[in-house]
Amino acid sequence: MILPGHIAAAFIASKALRVPTRGAMAASMCPDMIDKPIRWLTRITPNDRIPAHSLLFWGATTYLAGHLAGRSFAKGWAVGYGVHLLCDEVNAHFNPGRIYPWWPFKRYTYHTGPTGLRSSLGDFSKTSLLLEATLAILGIALWWRSGGGRFITTR
């Protein structure tokens, strides 16, 4: 999944679960902001979904978010990060690649993934892009219905 789908999914989940939208939105892109530069710039990982697309990083960053920004923010963070991982796992059924939730505790056969934005976008199937567009449209509709422009609120 890419930017619009992750943001929309986090927004929808934060509203549905009644957790702080700020935390969910902040976490919605965290795994990609860590993993993609590591892979694309340094090539030290086999793909662009290690290490932050893991349960270890989800737990560690949620703990850190709670410590730095408070328990309420951390609830939103946990939802946003979790939804990111869930969306990528669903998306992996339509495209090459996958996530590695138990990294580094479990050995995996890693998909050798993209080395940049262009090759990353080339991995997406039509089904995946349709899912992305649907999530984005639903997210925009919910945002508009909930007051549009005020989506970064404490609730």
Image (cartoon, rainbow, N blue to C red):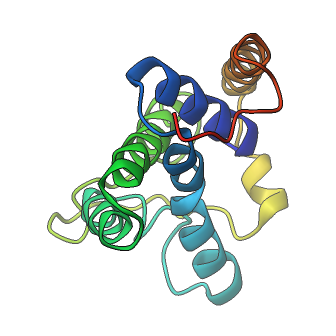
Up/down of 14 relative to 69, above or below: above
- Describe residue 40's horizontal placement relative to residue 154 as left or right: right
Q: Quadrant of residue 109?
A: bottom left
Nearest the eye: 4 or 24: 24
- Image quarter of the N terminus: top right
In this figure, what is the number of numbered marks?
Answer: 0
List x then y, in percent, for residue 12.
56, 23
Is residue 63 shown left or right of residue 22?
left
Residue 30 in the image: above or below residue 39: above
Residue located 56% across and 43% down the image: 96
User: In percent of the image, x 49 and y 30: which residue is there?
Assistant: 14
Q: Nearer the viewer, residue 52 or 20?
A: 20
Q: Nearer the viewer, residue 19 or 61?
A: 19
Residue 30 coordinates in the image, percent (x, y) = 54, 61
Query: Image point 34% across, 45% down: which residue?
Result: 75
Check the image and name the residue furthest to the left: 105
Image location (x, y in percent) of residue 35: 54, 70
Please determine whether, in this image, residue 59 is positioned above or below residue 7. below
Query: Residue 56 lies in what quarter of the image?
Result: bottom left
Q: Residue at x 47, y 43 (%)?
A: 80
